[in-house]
Image (spheres, grey):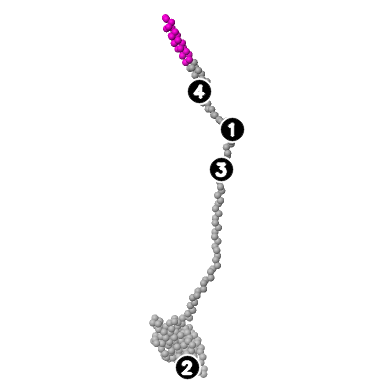
């Protein structure tokens, strides 16, 4: 075999061996490195910056205190208002004059003149017995009957004055009665005569003896007295 064919073959064989050796070396080196570290374990490395002058001391965390709950004061009830007593105000005096009280209602009045014809003061012809004592020849009425005011005369507004001549007997009763002066209304004249007829008189006396005597009696009918 010529020499120029042997050298290249040897060189190729040497390279092949070197490649195989290198591959085996690399394979075993990688296996060794991988086997030296425990499988499944991770290593954590913490990097801290340390300033010059020593280690950094951590300041303790400030304690946080919750502020105490503010106490809510209980509401104070408002005091009840006290009643204020006011002095009563004086009532203003009324300038309007008070009406004068009207006199008590009176019915027809009887005036008893004396025998000479002088009229004596009027007397109230009240239904209760009234003793009217006069002086001189004035008649003394022991019992009076108030004349009745006719209803029709009231409605028609009839008023008037009746003068009667009355003969008083010795026993004090009324005898003959005549109309000396009419009121102008027959109803009023009749009412006056009817009332006086029931009157009782004190007998007229002469020398201590009772005797008949004539008197003039006035009966007044007025609606203002009703």
Instruction: Please identify the quarter of the rendering in which residue 182 is found.
Output: bottom left
Q: Nearer the viewer, residue 138 or 2?
A: 2
Magenta span contains residue 10:
yes
| In the depicted structure, whether residue 39 falls above or below residue 103 | above
Label 2 sits on residue: 116
Q: Is residue 203 visible?
A: no
**Residue 32 within the segment the image draws in magenta:** no
Q: Residue furthest front?
A: 4
Q: CA distance from mark 2 to mark 1?
A: 158 Å
68 relative to 53, above or below: below
Dot 1, how many residues are within 10 Å of its Cα: few (below 14), some (14-19), or many (20+)? few
**Mark 3 and mark 4 residues within 8 Å of each other at the beta carbon:** no
Q: Left or right: 75 with respect to 156?
A: right
User: Mark 4 or mark 3, which is nearer the start of the sequence?
Assistant: 4
Q: Which residue is mark 3?
A: 66
Measured in 3D between alpha carbons, the distance from the residue under mark 4 to the one under mark 2, in whole angstroms, is: 176 Å
| Marks 2 and 1, the one that precedes in the sequence | 1
Please state the extent of the stretch shown in magenta in the rendering. 1-23
Q: Secondary structure at mark 1?
A: loop
Label whose residue precedes the other's in the sequence (4 or 2)? 4
Q: Which numbered disc flags the more N-terminal residue, 1 or 4?
A: 4
Quadrant, the N terminus: top left
The residue that label 1 is drawn on is 56
Q: CA distance from mark 3 to mark 1?
A: 30 Å
Determine which residue is flagged by label 4: 39
Q: Residue furthest bottom?
A: 207
Judged from the image, the secondary structure of the residue bearing numbered disc 3 is: loop
User: What separation in Å lies between label 3 and label 2 (alpha carbons)?
Assistant: 129 Å
């Amino acid at each position: 075999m010529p020499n120029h064919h042997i050298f290249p073959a040897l060189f190729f064989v040497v390279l092949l061996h070197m490649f195989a050796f290198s591959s085996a070396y690399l394979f075993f080196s990688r296996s060794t490195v991988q086997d030296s570290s425990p499988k499944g374990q991770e290593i954590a490395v913490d990097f801290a910056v340390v300033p010059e002058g020593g280690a950094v001391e951590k300041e303790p965390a400030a304690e946080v205190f919750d502020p105490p709950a503010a106490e809510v004061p209980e509401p104070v009830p408002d005091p009840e208002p006290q009643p204020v007593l006011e002095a009563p105000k004086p009532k203003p005096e009324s300038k309007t004059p008070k009406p004068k009280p009207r006199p008590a209602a009176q019915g027809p009045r009887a005036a008893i003149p004396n025998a000479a014809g002088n009229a004596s003061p009027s007397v109230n012809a009240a239904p209760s017995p009234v003793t009217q004592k006069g002086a001189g020849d004035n008649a003394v009425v022991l019992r009076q009957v108030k004349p009745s005011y006719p209803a029709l005369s009231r409605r028609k507004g009839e008023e008037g004055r009746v003068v009667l001549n009355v003969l008083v007997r010795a026993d004090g009763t009324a005898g003959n009665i005549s109309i000396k002066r009419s009121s102008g209304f027959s109803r009023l004249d009749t009412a006056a005569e009817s009332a006086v007829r029931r009157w009782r008189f004190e007998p007229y006396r002469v020398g201590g003896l009772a005797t008949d005597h004539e008197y003039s009696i006035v009966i007044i009918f007025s609606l203002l007295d009703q």
